[in-house]
Image: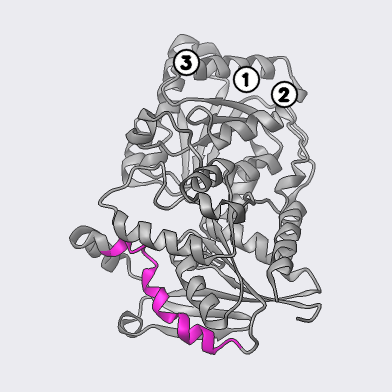
């Protein structure tokens, strides 16, 4: 192997897609391509609604990005969800792209030294598994979320098939990285024979996006939430607590301004409409608009997914690492997290002293924190509202350096 490391980066979640996982992939890719000692080729998907794409999996080369053309139709997917939901779960909505792996391989001019994949979706890992075997090169599999061992409620999940495929991925990968220590420890316990190749590599922020965000008191305390709002991540519990707060302390509540921005499910939009007198809903916004809202806020609201009853019974912590926390760290504002106890979110907030975390049902605790925020605002407490922390460990530049070191150690 020459000094130049030739990397094949497999990630269905990749720009121009704008979901949270694609934004994470873009940060990793950016700092890989900044290095002169590395060449990076991407394998991803490009969505197409053409009838041709429905019946044939095609592949296109776009600069150093190989795109598997994947048929996408909201209507078609809605029909599948309604009539044959299992088709969406082997392993996910992107599974059709797996068929394009061989055509993608044929467009790769130079054999890679190492493959790195990002999942979710899990289909990325299954494509990378096939490419790793085809080229006979080592593979670093990043698993941003747990698959079978997920603490989120699952509907009609094909567990036997998923368990078998999950085991295959874990055994085939040379290194497995997890964005959450809790998830990594859970998998290390379940797959103890492979625990030695599991590494904690968290979600990241772009250090070039950091700039001083001095806090100045305004006439309102602006609480901002940005991000997607599926039913499992509804702000309803926070809003019910704020409603109680407004009834208990109307003079204080009138000093708050509540804003929500992001794609919301129909059910969540219906819930938000019940609080029209208390909040402003911006609807879906661009990433740039989201960042602007965060920087203009006084307090940033984070809402974690609710975990399944099975995990509540076993008192297991919520293991997911929401990348939104990193956006909030960059904004340099305090965070109020509505999350389960001992979650990754609460541990990060505690470690870096950037906010408070409260369980969804703890209305009195949420109200108490709102009282605390109001008191700090009334005293013009700049220290409370300007939460500047280095958090260099979560820098994309630093974590890419770690990943490159891992990949150089594997390449042969």
Q: Residue at x 71, y 55 (%)?
A: 399
Q: Who is closer to the viewer here, 336 or 402?
A: 402
Give the residue number, with chain letter if any, for mark 1.
373
Q: Residues within 10 Å of mark 2 (few under 14, many from 20)?
A: some
As drawn, is 213 to the left or to the right of 113?
A: right
Image coordinates of residue 280 in percent, x first then y, are 47, 36
* SS assignment at label 2: helix
Q: Are marks 2 and 1 in contact (CB under 8 Å)?
A: yes
Give the residue number, with chain letter if any, for mark 2.
384
Q: Specify the label residue 245 is tagged with.
A: 3
Residue extending farthest front: 193
* SS assignment at label 1: helix
CA gap between label 3 and label 1 equals: 12 Å
CA gap between label 2 and label 1 equals: 8 Å
Q: Main secondary structure of the magenta part?
A: helix
CA gap between label 3 and label 2 equals: 21 Å
Compared with 234, 178 (above or below) is below
Compared with 62, 246 (above or below) is above
| Residue 400 in sight from this viewpoint | yes
As drawn, is 347 to the left or to the right of 193?
A: right
Q: Residue at x 44, y 18 (%)?
A: 363
Q: Who is closer to the viewer here, 51 or 218?
A: 51
Span colored in magenta: 87-108
- Which callout, 3 or 2, points to the residue nearer the camera? 2
Q: Residue at x 59, y 86 (%)?
A: 108
């Amino acid at each position: 192997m020459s000094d130049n490391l030739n990397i094949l980066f497999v990630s269905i979640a990749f720009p121009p897609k704008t979901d949270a996982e694609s934004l994470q992939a873009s940060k990793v890719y950016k700092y890989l391509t900044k290095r002169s000692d590395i060449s990076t080729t991407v394998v991803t998907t490009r969505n197409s609604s053409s009838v041709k794409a429905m019946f044939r999996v095609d592949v296109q080369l776009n600069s150093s990005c190989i795109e598997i053309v994947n048929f996408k139709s909201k209507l078609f997917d809605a029909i599948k969800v309604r009539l044959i939901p299992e088709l969406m779960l082997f392993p996910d909505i992107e599974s059709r792209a797996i068929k394009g792996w061989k055509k993608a391989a044929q467009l790769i001019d130079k054999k890679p030294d190492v493959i790195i994949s990002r999942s979710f979706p899990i289909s990325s890992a299954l494509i990378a598994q096939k490419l790793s075997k085809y080229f006979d090169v080592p593979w670093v599999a990043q698993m941003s979320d747990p698959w079978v061992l997920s603490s989120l409620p699952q509907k009609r999940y094909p567990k036997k098939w998923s368990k078998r495929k999950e085991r295959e991925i874990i055994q085939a990968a040379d290194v497995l990285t997890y964005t959450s220590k809790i998830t990594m420890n859970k998998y290390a316990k379940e797959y103890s024979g492979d625990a030695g190749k599991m590494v904690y590599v968290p979600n990241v922020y772009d250090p070039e996006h950091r700039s001083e965000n001095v806090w100045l008191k305004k006439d309102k305390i602006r609480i901002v939430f940005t991000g997607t709002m599926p039913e499992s991540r509804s702000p309803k519990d926070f809003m019910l607590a704020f409603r109680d707060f407004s009834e208990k302390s109307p003079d204080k509540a009138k000093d708050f301004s509540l804003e929500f921005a992001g794609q919301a499910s129909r059910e969540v939009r219906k819930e938000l409409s019940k609080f029209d007198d208390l909040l402003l809903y911006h609807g879906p916004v661009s990433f740039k608009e989201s960042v602007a809202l965060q920087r203009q806020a006084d307090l940033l609201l984070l809402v974690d997914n609710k975990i399944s009853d099975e995990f509540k019974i076993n008192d297991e912590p919520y293991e997911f690492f929401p990348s939104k926390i990193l956006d909030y760290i960059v904004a340099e504002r305090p965070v109020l997290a509505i999350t389960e106890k001992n979650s990754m979110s609460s541990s990060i907030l505690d470690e870096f002293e950037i906010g408070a975390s409260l369980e969804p049902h703890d209305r009195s605790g949420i109200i108490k924190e709102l009282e605390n925020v109001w008191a700090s605002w009334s005293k013009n407490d700049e220290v409370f509202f300007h939460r500047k922390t280095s958090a260099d460990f979560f820098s994309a530049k630093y974590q890419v350096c770690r990943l490159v070191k891992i990949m150089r150690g594997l390449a042969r």
